[in-house]
Image (cartoon, helix red, strand yellow):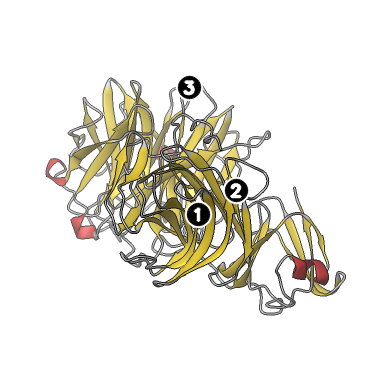
């Protein structure tokens, strides 16, 4: 059998998240002289937040760290909690606005400051020797500042915590304010993290809602014809994904010059992290509808290793390296590499290059990984050059059960595209973009878990790893998108049809609904009895509807 088509070129957003190592949050981004610069908060206990790092990239793929571009040693009044830097270039000077000291009342020293440098990589030094905004105005804590220069040259500062958002005009010197221009523009749901940008004549205000240490942190936005608003809430576009990360928020956006390509940069908390400061930087593509509204952002779980690293991967049983844009392991009894994910219904695919012996492929719904042979619980689909087979099976902490296999011509050191679609208890494996699965099995042993890569007694290389939830509404057996997940396309499903899809009677505790879709759940068969309507993700079905689905209708946008 011929190998898979050549992999696509490297492009922004495809080399994995987090895109830099370390605990960081609250990113802001600017494009200076052909280089993208990201300035985040160093995410640590407040007393340790005494400096700011930056990261630069010419292609949004390869990133260089610039340590301590701003340090409290260069700001006489800042002692701790240096937060949310916002950069801008004007007057032949690079400015960096920041919050410091986390003041709780007007009697404390701190607030929003401004530093300057003749280089985007710093060092930045305090521009005025005091805070630019040092008091609570309109109830807004002076934090989370964002600077924006309109097309007419007028500069604005948007800021505020404690559920209040202000805007104030900056004077042309960029280090003083028009003190008569403070205006509260707090939109519905606003908590913190204001961000302003402009596209096609429309002003977009973005902000964060929820608690920054909790899983409900999210990004919403509003649109206006003026930089002063008002900004009625247009929707929430970024929220937690229980399969990938929680606590996603405090964002920035960037437009690739000369295009209408936009990316949203934000922080999120890896699954299982309980320390509120354990946040990492991520970014994903952001798309607009024809009317200018923003489509919900899908967190990505992918890696093409074009950045030369394997951030976010955890390895077991072997040494893994990134070489020539591929993730490579040498021959060992059982080499595993896993991403910290928790998918149930999923599509998981990669380009796989097996060695001359053994097999190599994809792991999914994995838990309890270890370094020994088959030392995990979960499923594995692989290809074997030595025996010319496609294999699907499962491990149970050291024991292996083959679920299905098929003959296929597999040559060593040739790249094949391997894809797994797991929807409920139905698992199908596809080779080289075929629309017909090579093997299919029915098994419900494992409902959800991590995904990853595996080489068994084989050297192997992997590229273009990507996992997504399948299209359609996803019904979960447990609350919080837990237990077995089954995806259904638009249509009407009687009890018999639901059973045929693997959904038993009176079975559903949480639900994911694609943007613009509507799901109608009926208590009785044939669309009778009490009906519940869902138009958005629901992590826990209301008590009256829990475990009471006997028929369902799904309408797409």
Q: Residue 506: which quarter of the image? A: bottom right
Question: Which of the 4 image quadrants contains residue 513?
Answer: bottom right
Q: Position of residue 32 (x, y in %)?
A: 34, 25
- Residue annotated with mark 2: 430
Closer mark to the observer between disc 2 and disc 3: 2
Q: How far apart are the two marked residues, 2 and 3, measured between alpha carbons?
A: 55 Å
- Disc 2 is placed on an element classified as strand
* Disc 2 from disc 1: Cα separation: 45 Å
Mark found first going from the N terminus, 1 or 3: 3
239 relative to 266, above or below: below
Q: Secondary structure at mark 1?
A: loop
**Tag 3 secondary structure:** loop
* Residue appearing at x 60%, y 48% in the figure: 430
- On residue 152, which mark appears? 3
Q: Position of residue 405 (x, y in %)?
A: 57, 57
Residue 356 found in image quarter: top left
- Residue 491 horizontal side relative to residue 458, left or right: right
Q: Is residue 484 above or below residue 431?
A: below
């Amino acid at each position: 059998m011929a190998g898979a088509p050549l992999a696509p070129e490297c492009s922004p957003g495809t080399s994995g998240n987090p895109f830099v190592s370390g605990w960081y949050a609250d990113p802001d981004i600017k494009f200076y002289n052909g280089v993208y610069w990201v300035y985040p908060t160093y995410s640590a206990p407040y007393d340790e937040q005494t400096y700011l790092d930056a990261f630069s990239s010419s292609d949004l793929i390869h990133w260089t760290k610039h340590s301590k571009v701003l340090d409290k040693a260069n700001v006489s009044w800042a002692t701790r909690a240096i937060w949310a830097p916002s950069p801008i270039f004007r007057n032949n000077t690079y400015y960096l606005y920041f919050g410091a000291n986390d003041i709780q009342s007007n009697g404390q020293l701190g607030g929003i400051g401004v530093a300057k440098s003749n280089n985007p990589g710093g060092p930045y030094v305090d521009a005025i020797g005091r805070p630019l905004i040092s008091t609570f105005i309109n109830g807004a804590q002076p934090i989370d500042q964002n600077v924006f220069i309109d097309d007419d040259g007028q500069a604005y500062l948007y800021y505020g915590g404690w559920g209040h958002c202000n805007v104030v005009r900056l004077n042309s010197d960029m280090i003083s304010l028009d003190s008569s221009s403070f205006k509260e523009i707090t939109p519905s749901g606003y908590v913190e993290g204001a961000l302003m940008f402009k596209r096609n004549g429309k002003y977009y205000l973005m902000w964060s809602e929820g608690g920054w240490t909790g899983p409900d942190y999210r990004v919403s936005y509003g649109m206006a014809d003026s930089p002063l608003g008002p900004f009625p809430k247009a929707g929430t576009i970024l929220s937690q994904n229980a399969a990938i990360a929680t606590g996603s928020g405090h964002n920035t956006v960037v437009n690739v010059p000369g295009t209408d390509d936009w990316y949203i940069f934000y922080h999120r908390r890896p699954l299982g992290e309980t320390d509120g400061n354990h946040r990492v930087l991520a970014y994903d593509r952001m798309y607009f509808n024809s009317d200018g509204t923003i489509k919900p952002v899908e967190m990505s779980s992918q890696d093409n290793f074009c950045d030369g690293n394997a951030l976010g991967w955890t390895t077991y049983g072997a040494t893994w390296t990134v070489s020539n844009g591929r993730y490579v392991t040498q021959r060992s009894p059982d080499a595993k590499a896993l991403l910290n994910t928790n998918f149930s219904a999923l599509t998981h695919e990669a380009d796989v290059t097996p060695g001359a012996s053994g097999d190599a492929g994809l792991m999914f719904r994995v838990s309890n990984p270890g370094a020994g042979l088959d030392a995990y619980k979960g499923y594995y689909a692989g290809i074997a050059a030595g025996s010319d087979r496609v294999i699907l099976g499962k491990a149970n902490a050291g024991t292996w059960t083959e679920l299905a296999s098929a003959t296929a011509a597999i040559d060593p050191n040739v790249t094949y595209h391997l894809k797994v679609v797991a929807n409920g208890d139905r698992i199908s494996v596809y080779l080289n973009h075929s629309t017909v699965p090579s093997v299919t099995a029915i098994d419900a042993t494992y409902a959800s878990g991590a995904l990853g890569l595996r080489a068994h007694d084989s050297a192997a290389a992997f590229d273009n790893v990507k996992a997504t939830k399948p299209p359609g509404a996803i019904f979960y057996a447990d609350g919080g998108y837990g237990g077995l997940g089954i995806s259904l396309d638009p249509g009407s499903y009687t009890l018999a049809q639901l059973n045929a899809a693997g959904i038993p009677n009176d079975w559903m505790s949480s639900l994911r609904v694609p943007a613009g879709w509507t799901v109608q759940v009926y208590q009785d068969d044939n669309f009778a009895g009490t009906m519940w309507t869902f138009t958005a993700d629901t992590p826990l079905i209301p008590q009256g509807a829990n475990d009471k689905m006997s028929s369902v209708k799904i309408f797409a946008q």
